[in-house]
Structures are given as structure tokens and as C-alpha cells.
Amino acid sequence: MLYADVIIDISVASLDRTFQYRIPPELTGKVRIGSPVRIPFGRGNASRKGYIVGISETPKFPPERTKDIAEVPERELTIEDRMVELAYWMREQYGGTLYEALRTVIPVREKVQKKPKRIIARTAPEDVIEEAYRTAVSKKHKAKARLLEPFCSQEFIPYEVAVGKMSITKPTIDYFVGEGILEVVDRTASGFGGDGLPFALNEEQQVAADTILKRRSEGKPFLLFGITGSGKTEVYLKVIEQILAEGKQAIVLIPEIALTYQTLLRFFRCFGDRVGYVHSKMAAGDRFQMSEKARTGEISVMIGPRSALFTPFPNLGLIVIDEEQELSYHSETTPKYYSDEVAKKRAEGCGAAVVFGSATPSVKSYYMSESGKYVLLHLTKRAKEGAELPKADIVDMREELNAGNRSILSRTLRKALTECLSRKEQAMLFLNRRGYSGTVSCRSCGEVLKCPHCDISLTLHKSGNLQCHYCGHTTKLPNVCPACGSKYISAFGTGTQKIEEYIKKEFPEARVMRMDADTTKGKDGYDTILSAFSEGKADILVGTQMIVKGHDFGKVTLMGVLLADMSLGVSEYSAAERTFHLLAQAAGRAGRDRLPGRVVIQTYRPDHYALLCAAAQDYPEFYKQEITYRRMLGYPPCTSMLKVLGLSKDEGVLSEAMKELAAAAQAEGVTVLGPAPDYVRYVQDTFRMVLYCKAASRDKVKQVKDRLERLSFENVSVQFEFSE
């Protein structure tokens, strides 16, 4: 006899409370984990709907007290059924428990006070608004200027966006209402539907939009590959316009870092109060309320980071993943899913189209388009008339050292900064830290110390040892460079704060701002810095990768990239790809309007193809070289690879468990690398070890995952993550 654990109500608060039911013999072949069922519930045996989350042969209660499942409904699936099925698929694909997958897919159900739906609308002519805006700027009334700026080009903004994302207080809004310039309107009464698309597509954009709409029934995802500033968002908006006209809904995923109010306002302007949004700082109750609006049809477009992918739209017609190459689309918590794969699975179940957009596509996505699994669409020119790609210079910092220049800035970048400031234009300085440190290289020749077995950079540990985190190879830190004998060999540790202090000292007349994890800790720190820089309150913006993605500042004519090759030393096979993405995005920030742009890339590896191709904005050439490297060494997407992460408080117990896991994987006939200590050996007193399994197909490495999941170890937990 089989027994099923059933959840009655699919809200996160109740997911950990299950009820056991007996599976009648006649239903045995119809049920599986994730199946919707009807069950008798409570003393009155009221018929309730539930979902099976576990099946076993062991009763938790005396069999005579256990009720039978009444039926397995045979009908069209509801949106709730589809979301539970999606959770079950994620659990099967990525490991973990169904409970963890359900928590990812289903929003926390919390009661929240229903908020009035309001917009702030302009009541004065556009020239009056512009004059009020200029006055606010001249008097340095920051909040007033921030509020008025969007009204210089549009009729309304949502009230919650003004007080939330824009940090506008009620007294500021009330001031302009009292002046007769603005008014607060109840959106429920007005039912504002937006102005429609206030622009016309150019020829390339129109072809892309038409192709997506005409070929969506084929079931293939689309890769919209457009250079920076080519107007990919306009294509999304055009396609969404048609999707909404058909009575369907759309999800637009954007990296969390790009979730600025300017992005939201573009969608609000076109589609009005049919647009909803979620983000990481939203309260659980507000997230649930937004989810309910989607389920009931109150909104038709949802914008947000990867969690927006699970919006319960009942008639989903389109999923867009903008900047699809971003690492933020890969979940770092169990289940460790990839948003592109989940998007394709969800679209498959409802016939929706999937569009991936990027100026620098992931190698995986371009590989899929090259093999015919994706439809490739090109945007080859910038959307703004007169805007051209910036001129790029690669500066060899080894030559700077030989010339006696030991400063952070090369002579080329210093001169370019001086000229930029003299023209009253803006500059950005980018230092790619991305959380990595300790990469060991030689300042004289640029040599990066690598593992002799894996072509992966070695990492310096506090012990003074260099170690490969793929195969475990260990060696001592040499006193001199093994390539040229120079004594200038060490780990780099320069940070954005040091850069900011140096720039202020060297250019005392310049107004300098810094944007990194430290300066954006506050609720609105990110938007505050970007707004101030956009308004011309700083001449130079120093920052990490936060400053290089998706921003459009017309007065920025210079982008300086410091230590451009730092990320090439990361212990990942995809290090060159990550470097190319960041540098190409950084280069794309300069010269986006009619002012000519310039990029200066400082490096110790000026001949590396990732840097050369990024400077030239030549993705096809980068892809050609990178995919050759991946094929030669057997890395994804040419093969599939599974990362097995083990965690334990006892390092010895963990080591033995990982050896057993490696042996079990080898028995499946796959290539096994490791086990070895993880990149961070232990976190919060928990030791971490990894091993990697490589095979020709995803099915084969999934087979390995399924086998390893059946093994259990005392005091050791195991997590699985596919590399793509």
C-alpha cells in the first residue's frame, strides 16, 4: 500500500504542514509528486483540493485511521496546478526538496492593508513644468527636481513609484499640488491605460518585432542580439503591445541592479496601470499583493528580477529576459536554477514566446542560436540618430611601469580625464572587483599563475599556498615570477574607495562620487547616486560593475577601466566570458548621445582576445575564440557539467563523503574532477568541498545527480548545481 503526503493550501505558510492519505489501488498509476488531488478533509470530510508532495510505503498513523484520496481530477490545469508542476520539474532538474522548490515558486501569503491606487498627473503645460524643474535645480532643491524631471516628458507617474523608488515625500508632492502644477488622481476611478508607444521603431527594430510575433508559434526562443544603445527595450514594448491586445500577459525580467524608476516609467507611460513590479526590498505582503493582482487580471505586465518569473498570470503570452547574460539570473540558493531554462519550461506549458536580449549574449545562448535551437535577431546600430560607438584605447600597464609610472592612472587615461573635465563633460571609472580578490600575477610581464592540469588560475590562500579549486593541485607562492624572473609578483587588492581618494587628490577641482556595495547600502542609495550623477551633480563616477549596466547618461563621454584583466584570474572556466561581458558593457556607457565617446582600458594582458574584442565591441570574434577554447577543453556549453558541493562541520567526515560521491559518479561513466576544497574553504565554521562531473549530455549528468541524491551521509549535506 502506498501513502501520499498532501498539502491542502498552496501558501508558503502551510507548505511545511502535510496530511497523509492512502492511495487507492485504482489511482496508483495516476498520481505522482506534484499531482493535484481531491481529498476528504476534517471531521465533516469536506471535499478539498490538495497537492501530493511525497509518496512512501510507510504510514505515519494507524492505517485504519488514514483516509483515502478521493480522486485525481481530469480537467484543464489551473494556474495554481501549473505552478506546482513547475516546482516539481525544478526539483527534478536541480535537486533539493519539493518544499524548497515550492517556496521559490509560490509567494508568501500575508495579509496587507489594501493601498489606494493613485497616480500623480501634471496639470500645467509642459513649458511650465520645465521652468519649475530648472528653478528647482538652480536652487538645489533635489527632491523637487527629482519629482518634476519625468513630467518634462510624460503625463503621469504612479504614486507608489514616486514615494518608493524616487524617495519623494508627501509634503513635496503636496507643494506642487498646491501650486496647481500636479494633481493626485485615484487610478481606480481614472483607469489610466497609458499613452501607448510614444515612438516609432527603426527598420531593424521593426523587423525584429515582426519576426517575434510571426514566428512565436514555432516554439523556439528568440535571441535579440543588439549593440549597446540599439533600442532593444523598444522592441520589447512593441511586442508587448500586441500581446496585451490579444488579452494575454507578459513578464519582463531585468537584473535587480537595473531596476531603476526610469525603466519602470517607460513601461508605465506605455501601458499605464496594467504594469506591476517586484524587487528584492519589497515586503513579503506587498509581493503577495502584487502576485494576486496578476492572478486576478488587475495587471498584465510584471517587471522584476528572476523571482518575477513565477508571476501567476493565467494566460501568459511572453517572457522577456533582458541582459540575459547576467549572473543574477542564476539562483545561488536551492534549487539552484537557471532562469532561462525555467522560462523555457514555463512557456512550453502555456504556448508563450520567450525573448532573450543582450548586447553581449552568453556563450550558451549564442551557441543555442548557432545550432538552430534559438532564432537569432540582430540590431546593429544605435537607436539615437548621430550616436556612434566610442573609440577605444588599450593601454599596456607593463609599459607604464617600465616608463616609471607607478600610479593607478596611465598617462593616456590621465590626459583623457583632464580633457573631459575641461569640456565640462562626465567620466566614469570602473574597477571590476565582483567579490574576487587574491589573484596572483606579475606586474612586469602580466603572467597569471595557473593550474598545470586545468588551465584555471590558482588562488592564493592565507597559508601562502596557491590552489586549484577544480582538481586540488597545490603549490607554494613563488618569490619570483616563473615566466620572467621578476620579483614584482603579488595579489592585487586595489578597491574603489582607494581609487576615489586618489582621483580627488589628483583632480581637486572635480566633483567625484563613488558607487559600490558600501555607498548603496541604504534603501534608496542606488537610485540617489544615479539620479545625482544624471542631474550633473558630479563630474566623475567611480564604481564597481553597478555603474556599467544599462545606464544611459548623455554627458558621459569617457569610460576608464582600471585593472581590466583582474577577472581573467578568477578560478572559473568562464572567466574570459565574464570579462568580455563587463568590459563591453562598460565601453557601451560612453558616447550614447551625440557627443563622441572614448574608452580607455588599462591592462597587463593587452593581447588577450576578451579585451581586444570588448574594446572593438566585436562579439562574433570573441565567441569564435571562446567556443574553440571550450570545445578543446570540454567545457559547457559543448559539454554538460555538474557541480557537487558538500558541507559539514567535520572536515574529515566531509572528505570521506566526497570520496564516496566521486566513486559513485565515476561508476556512471562520467569524467570526475576532484574532490577539492571549495573556493572558500569554509563559511561560518562549515567546511566546503566540491567535485565536478562532466559528460556529453545534460541527461547523463542529471542521471549522476539522481544517483548521488540517493546517497545519504551523517552530518554532511550535499547540493547540486549545473554549469552552463
Image: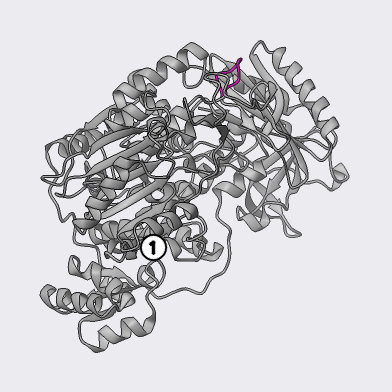
Q: Position of residue 211 (x, y in %)?
A: 21, 32
Q: On the rendered structure, is 462 left or right of 237?
A: right
Bounds of the magenta segment: 450-456
Q: Residue 11 versus residue 590: which sits nearer the camera?
A: 590
| Residue at the image position 34 percent from the left and 44 percent from the top | 560
Q: Tag count in the figure?
A: 1
Looking at the figure, which quarter contains the N terminus? Answer: top right
Secondary element type, mark 1: helix
Q: Is residue 454 magenta?
A: yes
When the figure is inspected, residue 274 is found, relative to residue 653, above or below; the finding is: below
Above or below residue 711? Residue 160 is: below
Find disc 1 in the rendering and name its residue. 529
Q: Is residue 505 visible?
A: yes
Name the residue located 26 percent from the left edge and 83 percent from the top edge: 176
Q: Amino acid at mark 1?
A: Ile
- In the displayed structure, 229 sits above or below 166; it is above
Q: Is residue 540 left or right of residue 497?
A: left
Magenta: main secondary structure: loop
Between residue 585 and residue 123, name the one nearer to us: 585
- Left or right: 118 in relation to 93: left
Query: Residue at 60% of width from left, 33% of height from top?
Result: 94
Please identify the quarter of the rendering in which residue 581 is found: top left
Rendering quarter of residue 376: top left
Query: Vertically, is 676 above or below 186?
Result: above
- 128 is within the stretch colored magenta: no
Camera-nearest residue between 185 and 315: 185
Foreground of the two, 337 or 100: 337
How are the colours assigned in the image? Answer: one colour
Q: Residues within 10 Å of mark 1 (few under 14, many from 20)?
A: some
In the rendered structure, the answer to whether residue 327 lies left or right of residue 451 reads: left
Residue at the extreme bottom: 178
